[in-house]
Structures are given as structure tokens and as C-alpha cells.
Amino acid sequence: MIIGIDATNVKSDGGIVHLFELVNNFKFNNSKIRKLIIWGNSKSLKNIKNNSRIDKIQVDYFSSSSLFIILWQLIFLPGELKKYKCDTLYVLGGVFFRKKIPTVSIFQNILPFMKDEIKRYNFFLRCKLLIQKKIYINSFLNSDGLIFLSNYSKKILNKEISFYRKKIIIIPHGVSEIFKFKHRKINKKKIKIIYVSKIDIYKNQIKIIKALNKLKEKFNISLSLVGSFDERNKKILEEKIHSLNIQKNVKIVGKVNYKKLPHLYNQHDIKIYASKSETFGMTMLEAMKCGLPILATKNEISYEILSSAGFFCKDTVDDIKYGIIKMIKNKKNLKARIKKGIKISNKFKWDITSKQTFNFLENLGG
């Protein structure tokens, strides 16, 4: 059996990590799968291991824009599947237009399905998200199999489409073994908070900054914002930082190499998670594995991932502020939840994710 993987639409940091961890942890032994064919841009393919049974095909030109990706999938992908004699197609970006062989999609981008979050964007971006939603739904309806990362994401999509006569499965992300616990104590004289996520409206960085502003007189506190950004969203954030005069307290770190993330986590005391428009929340697991206590805004996905290991607050500036204070002052509870977090995170392994994913693809193709 030959599996084709369309990764041309994989651009986010989390999507790239998912791709190379999925493939690098796959073992061909005891599998009917004898070859993997992967189409993607050079950025998404570079960390995939070299193996005679894995063909990495760069399509950088067609991955440069959404329009070119659509053209590639419509015109070239059917021919590529035939050329490489693929038996099953796995669509990592969740979007395809022409079905030639059994196809599996994964639901990773939940934002177009979140009505309240979409309202926060301007007219142009709202239209873009609504178009994306229609394209996703069409792809999912035409898929033979669907992979979900969480119960929450399955629940959200089930409001839009029926899973009747479709093969579906929930396969969560894993956590790399590069993330390790490093013993630390929160120093009340200087508290370092980290938020790892791309800078965007629905990630709520501005609410965290406002909460930090209310704490700066009481605590020596800093915030590191780690993740990719576009210039528009970065400018909005910088203007808010300047208007509150907290340039010394907030650092926009930008994107960090995946292998350097464990070191960065271990330089901080608290991890914040403030988005409710996520299909999973990989950074929560990464931080827990490094022994960081996590403050998350109350929503179904944060409860599903963190369970009893998390600290939770409402999605307001004041509640975020009081949540941070509670964590700083409650050392005993803090230690207990750190231990629970490490225990929970150790259950999520990429080799298990990889095995379950390719078993699903193999069984569907068979």
C-alpha cells in the first residue's frame, strides 16, 4: 500500500511539527504500507527524516498562496496520485477538491467555525473565514475518513455535518521527548510568564497585556510572547504595549526554533493559554512536560487537555489578573498541579499518535 500525504497547505508551526513527528515516528515494520509520498513546501519537509521509503516532493511555487494551492490540488494532484500509484490520500490541510482515491482529512483549523470569534475581525477577514468554512465542509463531506485531535473539535464539526457512514477517529497530538522537566521555584521578586502562540486577535494577547499592566505595580512581572506573527497584528500589539507604557515588562520574542522551545519554557515560571478557538492545544502539553503550571481561560478544550492539572479563569482581564495572583500565592497547590501536569503530559506520545494515524489510513485503504 502506498499512502499519499498532501501537506501543501501546512504552514502553521503546529501543523509543521505534526507532520514531521507523525512521519518520523512511523515504523514500516508490521505494516501494509510500503511507501509514503509527501507533497509540501521546503519548510514543512526539511525536518522529515531521509528514508528510501519516503518520497519528499517539494512544491514551493504552488504553496506560496492559497490560490496556487487550489490550482495545484485541482490540476496537478490527481496526476501525481496516479503517477506514484497512491492507494489512499491523507490531506493534512483539511482541504481538497477532486477525489480520485479513498481520502482522509484531519480537522485542525477550528477558527472558521467559531461564530463569536469571527465577529472580532474586519469585513474582509470575516468573508475569508466564511469562505474557508464552506471549503472545509465540502472537503469533510467528501472524505471517507475524518481524524479529530480532541472530543471538543469533533463536537464542533458535528454541529455542521453528519458523520453518518463515515469512518471517524480521535487521535490527539503527542509531545516530543525533548520537552523535559526542570525543577524551579517561582521567585516572587521576579515572575516570568510565557505565552506560546502566534499573534492574532483570537489568541487574546491584548487581554493578557492589560492584566499584566494591573499587576506591574504589585509584582516584578514580565511576559514573553513567543510565536509567529504578521506585521499588521504585531503593530496592533506594539501600539497597545506603548499606550500602557509596559515596554519593559513585555517582550515580543517572535518565532523560535522548535528544538529551542524546551529551554525557553524552562526559563519561565508560568504558562498562559488564552485561546478558545483551538482543536487541541499542543503548547499546554509541552509546558506541562517541562513542569510549568498553566493558567488557562475556561473553555472545553483547555479543560479536556489540562483536566485537574490546570488553573482556570474567565475570559476577562480582571479574572486573568486574579488567576495569576492565585498561582503566585498558592505554592502548595501549585506544586501538586505541576506534578499532575507532568503525569498527564507523559501519556501523550508521538509514536502512539503516528501508529494510530497510519493504522487508520491502512484500514480505510484496505
Image (spheres, helix red, strand yellow):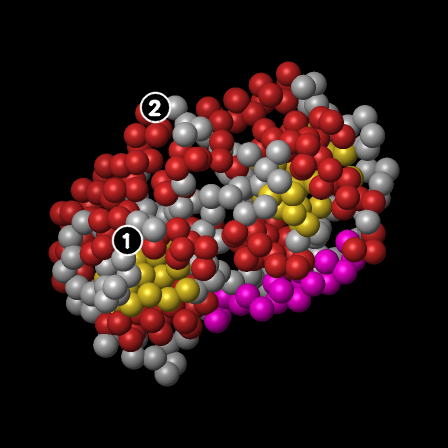
Q: Is residue 15 left or right of residue 64?
A: right
Is residue 290 at all visible to an observer of this figure? no
Quarter of the N terminus within the rendering: bottom left
Q: Nearer the viewer, residue 141 or 89?
A: 141
- Residue 164 locus on image (x, y percent): 25, 64
Q: Earlier in the sequence, mark 2 or mark 1?
A: 2
Magenta residue check for 338: yes
Camera-near label (2 vs 1) is 1
* SS at badge 2: helix
Magenta residue check for 286: no
Q: Nearer the viewer, residue 160 or 139?
A: 160
- Residue 366 locus on image (x, y percent): 23, 77
Q: Which residues are magenta?
A: 334-352
Q: Mark 2, residues whose alpha carbon is within 10 Å: few (<14), some, or many (≥20)?
A: few
Q: Amino acid at mark 1?
A: Ile
Query: What residue is disc 1 on?
Result: 161
Q: Is residue 64 left or right of residue 355?
A: left
